[in-house]
Amino acid sequence: MHLTKELISRPESLKRLIEKIFEQHTHQDEVIISIYAMIFPQWNDIEQLHGHPVCGDKLWRYICELFIKFDKIHHPRCMAGGAWINYWFSVDAQLEPWEINLSNCSIAYKET
């Protein structure tokens, strides 16, 4: 994952990239898919992803806070941040604060 390794050392750049994702969408699913596409550049070629990425505590909290703000605006009737908490990246305090670990993921690509 060249993108992840490159951006971990520059959290401000990673934050801005993630903020842009939230700015471009109005639905939780769109945000989550865009975050996955950021991590997996060949997202459109993936049939199924087994497992979940794991990220450091600061990154997980940052995205969760953005989801809470996003949901209060776009989905005021649902639990703010619930989509992120329930369905997506796991957190591991043993990782670097902005690290993303994909070792728990395996990818099945679409047949061409």
Image (cartoon, grey):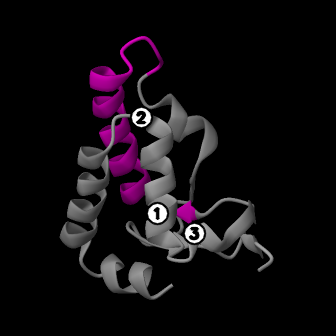
Q: Which residues are magenta?
A: 54-79
Does residue 78 appear left or right of residue 73 in this picture?
A: right
| Sequence-wise first label, 2 or 1 | 2
C-alpha distance separating marks 1 and 3: 22 Å
Element type at marker 3?
Answer: helix
Depicted 73 relative to depicted 42: above or below = above
Crowd tier of the residue under label 2, counting other residues whose Cα lies within 10 Å: few below 14, some 14–19, many 20 or above: few
Q: Amino acid at mark 2?
A: His
Does residue 11 appear left or right of residue 43 in this picture?
A: left
Q: Residue placed at 32% from the left, 39% from the top?
A: 65
Crowd tier of the residue under label 1, counting other residues whose Cα lies within 10 Å: few below 14, some 14–19, many 20 or above: many
Residue, disc 2: 27
Q: Amino acid at mark 1?
A: Gly
Image quadrant where residue 47 sits: bottom right
Query: For this rendering, which residue is in front, 28 or 111?
Result: 111
Q: Position of residue 52 (x, y in %)?
A: 66, 59
Q: Residue placed at 32% from the left, 24% from the top?
A: 74
Image quadrant where residue 10 sits: bottom left
Q: Main secondary structure of the magenta part?
A: helix
Residue, disc 1: 56
Image quadrant where residue 21 sits: bottom left
